[in-house]
Image (spheres, rainbow, N blue to C red):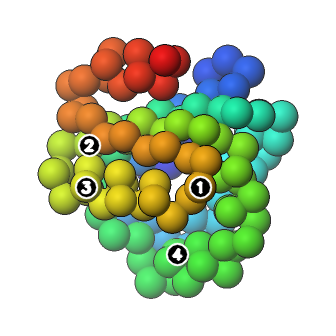
Amino acid sequence: MFKISLNGPDRLDIEMSGKLNTEEMKSALDELVIKSQNIEKGRMLYDVIDYHLPSLGAIMFEFSRLPSMLGFLKKFERAAVLADQTWLKKISEFEGHFFPGLEIKAFDRDQKSEAEAWLMS
């Protein structure tokens, strides 16, 4: 499951659980691009409920869309990741080093209010 909600003029809330297949990945990436069209200096709250690696086909599709996804990420200044797994939080923050202008900070899933406060600061 990949659910994307526009939360105000400059914020996307994303919920992910389970394993994404190719069709679900395509749908999710298309929806991300569409819902972020008018966002500038945006914020993202990414809630990883139950993480499973996507299917190989989904990963390949994601790589094929890398140029458009880089344009998508440039619309955002901050992303807060809610996750229970320590390794997932560390990888999320590490990924932030690859995208200039985007700061990523990870929180435990029960720290949603702290994550939202950080996004707005």
Mark closer to the observer (2, 4) = 2
Q: Which residue appears at 59% of the width and 55% of the height?
A: 100
Residue 47 x/y as whole percent: 38, 38
Instruction: Kindly report the distance in space between the C-alpha atoms of the residues bearing marks 1 and 2.
Output: 23 Å
Read off the residue under disc 4: 58
> What mark, if any, has residue 90 been given in the picture?
3
The residue pinned by badge 1 equals 100
**Circle nearer the viewer, 3 or 1:** 1
Looking at the picture, does residue 73 appear above or below residue 65? Answer: above
Residue 117: % across, % down: 41, 16
- Amino acid on which the number 4 mark rests in the picture: Ala
Q: Which mark is residue 83?
A: 2
Percent position (x, y) of residue 69? 68, 62
Q: Pointer 1: residues within 10 angstroms few (<14), some, or many (20+)?
A: few
Q: Nearer the viewer, residue 15 or 66?
A: 66
The single residue placed furthest to the right in the displayed view is 38
Q: Which numbered disc, 3 or 1, marks the residue that appears first in the sequence? A: 3
C-alpha gap between disc 2 and disc 4? 21 Å
- Residue occupying image coordinates x 66% and y 73%: 66
Residue type, numbered disc 3: Lys
Q: Earlier in the sequence, mark 1 or mark 2?
A: 2
Tell me what residue is drawn at x 51 percent, y 64 percent: 98
- 17 left or right of 2 in image: left
In the image shown, does 29 or 77 lie closer to the viewer? 77
Q: Is there any visible trace of residue 12 in the rendered image?
A: no
Tell me the distance, in whole angstroms, between the alpha carbons under discs 4 and 3: 23 Å
Secondary structure of the residue carrying numbered label 1: loop
Label 3 crowd (10 A; few <14 / some 14-19 / many >=20):
few
Q: Secondary structure at mark 3?
A: helix
Q: Is residue 64 above or below residue 99?
A: below
